[in-house]
Image (spheres, rainbow, N blue to C red):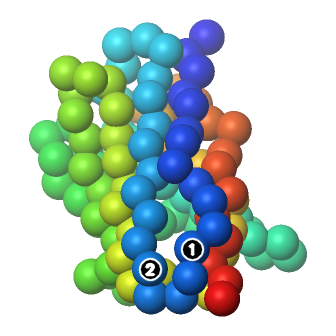
């Protein structure tokens, strides 16, 4: 069973930056699509950013220009650089890996944006 482990969450002031990392327990990064999702209380889990095996990225308008996803296949890791954070970015952030019918999720890491 593949395990994804996120790290890097925490408390940050509005306008600040935070970087998240996700590491896999097995070698899947070269073949799986990867992405970051988030979920805040009372809301559905939503996609924050995704990246293909060749490095093509996508993200919703709400974070475009502020969040950047990247991957290092050699290190079996993906990253999410978050800049200009807003209170509405507060959520639990999850790492996801997927390929056709297979998917894996991390346990999540809390990001809180507050003064």
Question: Which residue shows up at 65% across the image and 50% down it?
Answer: 109
Question: Against 41, is 47 above or below?
Answer: above
Which residue is farthest left? Answer: 54
* Mark 2 to mark 1 CA distance (whole Å): 6 Å
Q: Position of residue 75 (x, y in %)?
A: 26, 23
Q: Is residue 13 left or right of residue 81?
A: right
The residue pinned by badge 1 equals 12
Other residues around mark 1 within 10 Å, as few (<14) / some (14–19) / many (≥20)? some
Report the number of discs. 2
Front position in the image: 73 or 12: 12
Give the residue displayed 36% in from the left and 19% down from the top.
28
Task: Check whether the beta carbons of the residues at disc 2 and disc 1 lie within 8 A of each other.
Answer: yes
Q: Residue furthest right?
A: 42
| In the image: residue 101, left or right of residue 83 | right
Taking the image as drawn, is residue 62 in sight? no
| Mark 2: secondary structure | loop
Q: Callout 2: 10 Å neighbours few (<14), some, many (20+)?
A: some
* Quadrant holding the C terminus: bottom right
Is 2 placed above or below 77 here?
A: above
- Taking the spot 44% from the left edge, 29% from the top edge, the residue there is 23
The residue lying at 27 percent from left, 82 percent from top is 65
Residue 53 at x, y percent in the picture? 21, 37
Disc 2 designates what residue? 16
Q: Quadrant of the N terminus?
A: top right
Provide residue 56's location: percent of width, then percent of height. 17, 54
Secondary structure at badge 1 equals strand
């Amino acid at each position: 069973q593949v395990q994804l482990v996120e790290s890097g969450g925490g408390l940050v002031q509005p306008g600040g930056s935070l970087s998240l990392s996700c590491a896999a327990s097995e070698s899947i990064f070269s073949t799986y699509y990867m992405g970051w999702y988030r979920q805040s209380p009372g809301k559905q889990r939503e996609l924050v950013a995704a990246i293909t095996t060749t490095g093509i990225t996508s993200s919703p308008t709400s974070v475009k220009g502020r969040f950047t996803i990247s991957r290092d296949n050699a290190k079996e890791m993906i990253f999410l650089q978050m800049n200009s954070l807003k209170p509405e970015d507060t959520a639990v952030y999850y790492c996801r890996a997927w390929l056709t019918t297979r998917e894996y999720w991390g346990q999540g890491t809390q990001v809180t944006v507050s003064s």
